[in-house]
Image (cartoon, grey):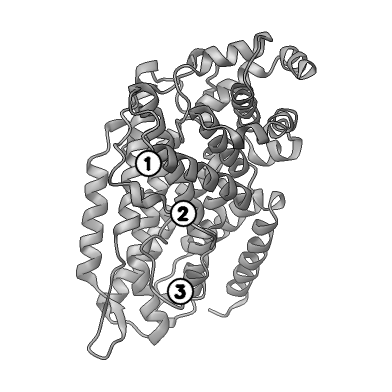
Amino acid sequence: MAASKMFMLRNERVGSALGAFADRIHCWYPVLSFDFPTNFSSFLSGHVSSPVDTCLALLALAIGSLAEKGNIAEALHERPDAPYYDEAAGMLQDILCDYTLGGLQCLILFSIYFMCRLKPCQAHDYVLMASFKAQNMLKSRTFSDDNSRSESLQRAYWAVLLIESELAVQLDLAESGIWKYDDNVPLPAGDHIWQHPREANLSPDSGMDHLSPQDSTDLTRSYFMAEIAMRRMLQRCTTSVSKSAGGHLQYAPLIAAELELQLNEWYDYLPPLLRFQKSPSKVSDLAILPTTLFLQTQYSACKISIFWPAIYQAIETGTANDELLHYCEKFLDEYVSFVLAASASLKSCLPNAWTLAARYDMKFYVFYEYDMAVNWLISLFIISMAAIRALSVDCIRELRHEQLYRYIHAALEAVGEVAPFSPSLMALHGIFRNAVDSINSSPG
């Protein structure tokens, strides 16, 4: 390990990589505690450091070196993370045998690392290990006599829940059962979150250079709470359909109105720093802060899901009355807002880049059923495929405007930028491109 330490000490990018991790990654999943800087300094100075502390420092640098590039394609091509990750991976056996808060944080960072690498299956493996460890710690009340560590464990639990839920939407893999604790685990207070000195690491395009340290702390805490609330709503809400007397599913405007009301109530509770324009129609309408932009994207995706059953009904029947067409048009209008926000968020939300580009739910894509209670999340691919499918219906196609086609092409371009670095994205991009070519060649 001595050679590795010397490598770290000679690397002038260490400070900026750690700053990028704080500014562009930790704001999404604030799992590190306020004592992290002490352990990190000991690691850099060559003092004896536990495998857990060393691994945690290496993972922060690996992820930060990817985030530092600012361009995901460039980062994945150059792989500045490789030396740090290779060292961290060599300590995995120690991490798996460890039963401390630091060991849990390492598993979470391993998962985040693979999310940033556009490797969702590997990220899922690690987040499930983290989930079981967090659940065991909570069930055994491991840190019940230590308020600081207890609060850190609660933050780790909620971070794991958010990551696992985001990945579970598109991966039909095992679940850890983490949701059975969500009513019993207190919401994180955010009193012991690590904050990096921000003066040294902000870039002009970060969107956060005007924030004071206290505003930065408040923003991290508020975003984390807002995202937890959003995820709970997605987990528990049903879709806007009802059954007719004959047992057929049909669009239910009253249920849709109630779902919109719940979504707007969630918005009304957002603090000023996280407020955004609800239906952006141009780039200048987009939120500046990355966390706010991601919430803006989720908001549009939720609206799309509420209106989607109207489109589905029109596709199934081939016709639509004036009321149904009204909601179909709202779907198409909201699609424009979604593509604007999602394409921009793809560049600033590195941990969720894969899910932004490619959430692939077969039930949604092939239109077999309506079960979208947790399927209204972010995906340029799947929502664009839904819009393209909608254009196959004559009455919906008559609503079209050139702007819609322009944004379908914009979504294809956004997915294409990151597709070369992920086999799954390459496959989905090919499907997407063929679908776009089909509407380009269609008459009318």
In the image, farthest residue toward the front: 140
**Is disc 2 in contact with disc 3, using a CB cutoff of under 8 Å?**
no
Q: Which residue is mark 2?
A: 378
The local secondary structure at tag 1 comes to helix
| Residue 258 horizontal/vertical position (percent) | 20, 61
Depth check, front residue: 95 or 37: 95
CA gap, disc 2 to disc 3?
A: 19 Å
Under mark 1, the amino acid is Lys
What residue lies at 48% left-to-right and 44% top-to-bottom?
131
- The disc at residue 265 is none
- The disc at residue 139 is 1
| Residue 273 horizontal/vertical position (percent) | 32, 31
In the image, farthest residue toward the bottom: 246
Quarter residue 96 falls in: top right
The quadrant the N terminus occupies is: top right
The local secondary structure at tag 2 comes to loop
What residue lies at 61% left-to-right and 74% top-to-bottom?
438
What residue lies at 42% left-to-right and 80% top-to-bottom?
315
Q: Which residue is mark 3?
A: 390
CA gap, disc 2 to disc 1?
A: 32 Å
Under mark 3, the amino acid is Ala
Q: How many marks?
A: 3
Q: Earlier in the sequence, mark 2 or mark 1?
A: 1
Q: Earlier in the sequence, mark 3 or mark 1?
A: 1
The local secondary structure at tag 3 comes to helix
Q: Residues within 10 Å of mark 2 (few under 14, many from 20)?
A: many
